[in-house]
Image (tube, rainbow, N blue to C red):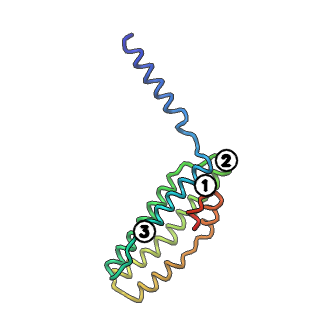
Amino acid sequence: MRRHRPIVLALTGALALAGCGGDDAPSRADFAEQADKICQDAKDKIEGLSEPKDFNDIEQYAADIDKAVADANKKLGDLDVPEGEDGEKAEAFQQAFAADYENQVKPKVEELREAAEAKDEQAVLRAAQAAQQVETPRTDRLAKDVGAEACAE
């Protein structure tokens, strides 16, 4: 048993070190940087989509937009938040982004997808116009409060 003691001590020490500092909350600046990267990546994906030319393209376009925003929503929600007041602001931003996605973006994109699936040109036009009019002032303000400027645009 003595021969294994150094290994056990080394493993115990490694586990203790892994536990230390692993739970450190990010700074406000770190949170903002990570959030900005997530938001910018989503914007780049959406802006990089090809303009749809027919109903099938519109269905795919809507699905791709939904995926980009859903992925951003998940990644933002998974971010560790700073401690204290900055953490409260970051959590409020995460919750507002999630609510905007669920209550505004997702339904509008689904409406566009369904209109394209039905091959209803007028419904597609109405859905596209409604999607362009989505406003997120609370989320934008909260993003600015935490320093995530790319998420506020």
Pointer 3 local density, CA inside 10 Å: few below 14, some 14–19, many at least 20: many
Residue type indicated by callout 1: Ala
Q: Secondary structure at mark 1?
A: helix
Tell me what residue is drawn at x 58 percent, y 49 percent. 30
The residue nearer to you, when weighing 146 against 139, is: 146
Q: Check disc 1 and report the residue beneath it.
A: 90
Quadrant of res 121: bottom left
Which amino acid does the dot numbered 3 rest on?
Asp
Q: Which mark is residue 66?
A: 3
Q: x, y (%) of residue 130?
A: 50, 81
Residue at 54 percent across and 32 percent down: it is: 20
Q: CA distance from mark 1 to mark 3?
A: 23 Å
Dots 2, 1 in contact, CB < 8 A? no
Picture coordinates of residue 141, whole percent (x, y): 64, 65
Q: Nearer the viewer, residue 33 or 124?
A: 33
The quadrant the N terminus occupies is top left
Q: Which residue is mark 2?
A: 84
Return the x and y of residue 50 as percentages of the image width and height.
Answer: 37, 74
Amino acid at pointer 2? Gly
